[in-house]
Image: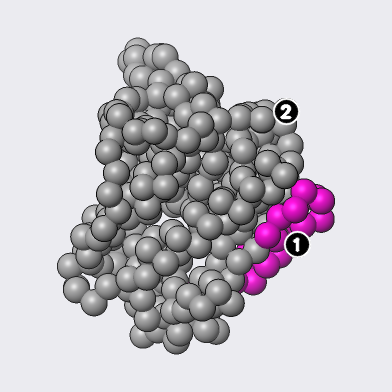
């Protein structure tokens, strides 16, 4: 158990004002951010950016009711910000503002990829998956967390870019920790945040240059569309993390080669090479999540030492 004392905690909606649609007026693109500030905290925060149809709560508690990654980072002294991207979690999806969304995911769609990869063996290496919690309720809890998402990669990018300014006013200097489809959002945020983004930890980020995805094509490096910000999102320390039993291994390797070619010292950790085995795409929810959190914190600690020297 990680022990720490909080100086502050809370949350609020990030807004972009109202928008008129026909004869109706709605909130514009909005998001929800929750924060936890430990006593005697570091000057650099960590901002968690969830993937796909998920939400920030995925990092707060595991499906089998263990403390999530948030608690490990708080115990290490980092202020933590949990973003529910526009239309996700506590930020509801309004088609009139955000555009159309994909159909709600069902068990047949998500279980083979997230909960039962070894059973369905849809890709090479899936048989190695063994870290999903055994309690059947854990799969139900995961499914309950999954909701709407946009029908294009560009829409997701534009939505998060819209709330970036207000987000960075809260987070200050920060490390972006993104997951899956939150990966492109992390790069887009960094292009707007510039020097405020100290580093990026990309957990199995979606996309690589030229990839054809069901929601669009990656036509601008690791994102679909031109960045709204002027900063180079890759011009900072970047860590890509990939599990042993995920379908993302080849795609992450290609993305890493792109990052390495940028010349800013990107690193790719394949968990099994660090003795952390059996993980799938939702590694923050799996039974060895604490070990992975420890690995991420060690990488940051080494980064700060290198920066100081």
Give the camera-side residue of 102 and 8. 8
**CA neighbours of label 2 inside 10 A, class few (<14), some (14 to 19), many (20+):** few
Q: Position of residue 176 (x, y in %)?
A: 53, 42
Image check: 179 left or right of 40? right
Seen at 82% across and 51% down, the residue is 263
Q: Position of residue 103 (x, y in %)?
A: 36, 52
Q: Position of residue 36 (x, y in %)?
A: 33, 35
- Give above or below for 208 relative to 79: below
Residue 108 visible from this viewpoint: no
Q: Position of residue 299 (x, y in %)?
A: 57, 56
Image check: 143 left or right of 279? left
- Give above or below for 133 relative to 101: below
Q: Is residue 145 magenta?
A: no
Image check: 56 left or right of 226? left
Give the camera-side residue of 64 and 41. 41
Seen at 19% across and 73% down, the residue is 136
Which residue is identified by label 2?
230
Circle 2: element type? loop
Seen at 28% across and 35% down, the residue is 6
Q: Quadrant of residue 22?
A: top left
Residue 68 visible from this viewpoint: yes
> Which segment is the magenta one?
245-267
Circle 1: element type? helix
Give the camera-side residue of 223 and 43. 43
Image check: 64 left or right of 214? left
The C terminus sits in image quarter: top right
Seen at 43% across and 59% down, the residue is 293
Which numbered tag is attached to residue 280? none
Which residue is identified by label 1?
257
């Amino acid at each position: 158990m990680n022990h720490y004392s909080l100086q502050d905690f809370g949350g609020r909606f990030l807004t972009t004002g109202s928008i008129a649609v026909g004869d109706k007026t709605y909130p514009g693109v909005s998001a929800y951010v929750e924060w936890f500030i430990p006593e005697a905290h570091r000057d650099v925060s960590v901002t968690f950016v969830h993937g796909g149809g998920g939400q920030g709560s995925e990092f707060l508690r595991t499906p089998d009711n263990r403390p999530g990654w948030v608690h490990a980072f708080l115990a290490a002294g980092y202020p933590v910000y949990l973003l529910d991207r526009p239309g996700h979690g506590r930020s509801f999806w309004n088609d009139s503002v955000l555009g159309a969304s994909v159909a709600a995911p069902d068990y047949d769609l998500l279980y083979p990829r997230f909960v039962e990869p070894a059973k369905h063996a849809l890709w090479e290496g899936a048989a190695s998956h063994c870290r999903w919690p055994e309690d059947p309720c854990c799969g139900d809890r995961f499914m309950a967390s999954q909701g709407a998402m946009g029908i294009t990669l560009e829409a997701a990018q534009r939505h998060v870019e819209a709330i970036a300014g207000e987000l960075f006013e809260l987070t200050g200097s920060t490390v972006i920790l993104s997951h899956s489809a939150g990966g492109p959002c992390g790069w887009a945020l960094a292009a707007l945040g510039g020097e405020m983004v100290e580093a990026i930890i990309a957990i199995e980020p979606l996309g690589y240059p030229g990839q054809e995805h069901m929601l669009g094509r990656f036509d601008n490096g690791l994102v679909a569309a031109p960045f709204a910000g002027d900063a180079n999102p890759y011009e900072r320390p970047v860590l890509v993390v990939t599990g042993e039993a995920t379908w993302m291994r080849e795609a992450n390797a290609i993305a890493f080669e792109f990052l390495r070619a940028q010349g800013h010292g990107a690193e790719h950790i394949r968990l099994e090479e660090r003795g952390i085995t059996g993980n799938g795409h939702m590694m923050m929810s799996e039974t060895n999540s604490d070990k992975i959190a420890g690995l991420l914190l060690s990488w940051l600690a080494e980064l700060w030492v290198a920066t100081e020297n």
